[in-house]
Image: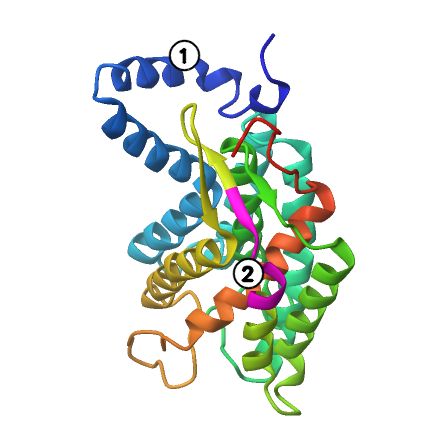
Amino acid sequence: MRDPRNVHATGPTLEPLRLVIRGLLSRLPPGLSEFILFGLKQAWACLFGALVLALIIVTKLVWQPDWAIHRYDALFVAALSIQILFLRLKMESWDEAKVILIYHVVGTVMEIFKVHMGSWVYPEDAVIRIAGVPLFSGFMYASVGSYMARVIRIFDMRFTHYPPFALTALLAAAIYLNFYAHHYIVDLRIGLFLATVLLFGRVRIYFTVERKARWMPLVLAALLTSVFLWIAENIGTATGIWLYPGQTTWHMVSPQKLGSWYLLLYVSFVLVTIVCKPQPPDAARP
């Protein structure tokens, strides 16, 4: 009987393509095959975010100011359509859609505050917006939640020494509130960095690419993921989708933003665990 956790890893529509790819990989040496498969699974996990980023780049290249619909509004409609298509084709589970919705709301609320405080600005017009924030921006946050939920399922991730939910929720709340509070009081991010290591430092993520379970420290996984998000942020600002103060001409986003992404990933992960409870490794695993 097939493991129900993997029934919709790609969705039935793309099952023939998946089987073709697996057949080609089976002809390669095992180590190389697993390495390529790891990359393909990671790409599949971040598909929603990759498509949103691709839309941002394409619209920057082709959009004209006299078109009937604003660029930001078109991006909102396109991102929503992708979400509906994913569910329709069973490329995404309803639990993952719940995570995206939660993160869309949480991200949009923070966007409204940050834009109000002048942390960044959306320079173009939009009809679908709240308090000067185009609602498509919530999908940029939601793509992080989508990745987290999908990668856990696709790699059948299990966790050792995972802390109690109450403690993780408390840390996530403190991180989220600090994004607001540091505008008024001392920035507590150094203490929050230490808190992530103290709370999650012993946690190992066990993941399966092919058959053998491998592991990585959760803190290291968060750090590596934050680097990729920072790269994506640089691409986003290069397209002018949003701008930081002083970015009238594009320049690289400060590496300090890596810390913000690192902390935000813990908020993302805790939100995901509301829907997808972390599971321990099987007893047979080391």
Residue 87's place in the image compared with 188, above or below, is: above
Q: Secondary structure at mark 2?
A: loop
Residue mark closest to the camera, 1 vs 2: 2
Q: Earlier in the sequence, mark 1 or mark 2?
A: 1
* 202 within the magenta span: yes
Residue 143: give x, y in percent of width and height: 52, 50
- Depth check, front residue: 152 or 229: 152
Q: In the drawing, does residue 218 fall left or right of residue 23?
A: right
Tags 1 and 2 touching, CB below 8 Å: no
- Depth check, front residue: 193 or 68: 193
Work out whether residue 160 can be spotted. yes
Mark number, residue 201: 2
Q: CA distance from mark 1 to mark 2?
A: 40 Å
Highlighted range, magenta: 197-205
Q: Secondary structure at mark 1?
A: helix
Pointer 1: what residue?
Answer: 16
